[in-house]
Amino acid sequence: MSFCDLFQIAGGSVPGRSHITVGKGNQDAYHWCLEENSLVAVVCDGCGSGAESEVGAAIGARLLVAEITRAIQLGRAIESPELWESVRQNVLARLSDLVSAMGGKRSHLVSEMFLFTVVGLAVAPDRAVIFAAGDGLFAVGDDVERLGPFARNEPPYLGYGLLDPDPVRPSSPRLIVHRAFPASELDSVLLGTDGAADLLALADRALPGGDGESVGKLSRFWEEASHFTNRDAVRRRLARINREITRPVWDERRLAREPGLLEDDTTIVVVRRRCQES
């Protein structure tokens, strides 16, 4: 049976409160490719200090998905270190060509645009893996694992390889496989940038607006069918969690402000097997 018939996939992203406050845009990105016998999805988080790191996050997400999909189609074993090193080097080569074509000081372009983290899922006909470079989180079923945070808030960005005169050497950041399992056991997987980690502590918090509904557990994203039938549902759910509410307090003659709950940009991609109808 085709993977398109076996799996559903959905995603969404919202800017964090700290970015909205200072007028910055969302520096996260996500992308996926669902083919007949492969599924690859990634979420990427651009470096917060990079002026335009959303550019590298978006380009990097597409390059990674394309490279990994191509490797699966060629029948390469997705757990092999050789595959992931090949993916890393090919993505860096394409980014390096782009940086060179843009002109200007290489180190400045890389630091401003091409530093981003990665958390991803790759599914071949027989095996599935969760891979990453940097911080974020993933959930395989109800088993949630947080990656990072890293010392001094400096995750190992793949883009550092663009500055390394010898990007093959062991010190250059790698794509790491954190989980591997039979594809037949994939019931649900959630991928999140590091902003999504805040959701773990917010499950019992009321949504802004005072209607009594709580944020809820991460499992809502793969258990509720609406997230897959409405292509904007994941983003809308995150937006509700992070909306700012201003309401009048009449007896005190003032306005009360209720801020959104997500401090950082937050991106989620969720995959589930189609038999899980709710």
Image (tube, grey):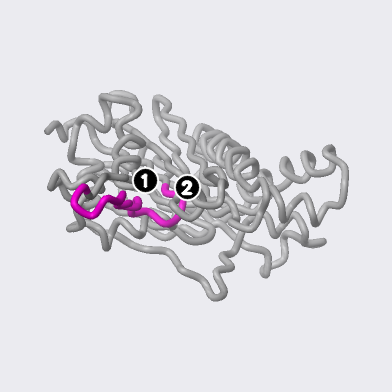
Q: Which residues are magenta?
A: 250-266
Q: Residue at x 55, y 43 (%)?
A: 25
Report crowding for label 2: few under 14, some 14 to 19, many 20 or more residues within 10 A (C-alpha). many
**Is residue 1 something that shows in the picture?**
no
Q: Is residue 33 above or below residue 218?
A: above
Q: In x, y percent, where is residue 142?
A: 21, 55
Q: Which residue is disc 1 drawn over?
A: 127
Q: Secondary structure at mark 1?
A: strand
Q: Residue at x 87, y 42 (%)?
A: 103
Query: Residue 257 lies in magenta, yes or no?
Result: yes
Q: In x, y percent, where is residue 132?
A: 49, 56
Amino acid beneath label 1: Arg
Which is more toward the observer, 153 or 5?
153
Q: Is residue 64 left or right of residue 129?
A: right
Q: Residue at x 38, y 36 (%)?
A: 11
Report crowding for label 1: few under 14, some 14 to 19, many 20 or more residues within 10 A (C-alpha). some
Q: In x, y percent, where is residue 133?
A: 53, 58
Which is more toward the observer, 100 or 84?
100
Q: Is residue 141 left or right of residue 94?
A: left
Q: Secondary structure at mark 2?
A: loop
Q: Is residue 254 above or below residue 269?
A: below
Q: Are marks 2 and 1 in contact (CB under 8 Å)?
A: yes
Position of the C terminus by quadrant: top left
Query: Residue 57 lies in magenta, yes or no?
Result: no
* Marked residue nearer the N-terminal end (2 or 1): 2
Q: Which residue is disc 2 drawn over?
A: 78
Q: Is residue 167 above or below residue 227?
A: below
Residue 273 location, quadrant: top left
**Is residue 213 something that shows in the picture?**
yes
Position of the N terminus by quadrant: top left
Amino acid beneath label 2: Ile
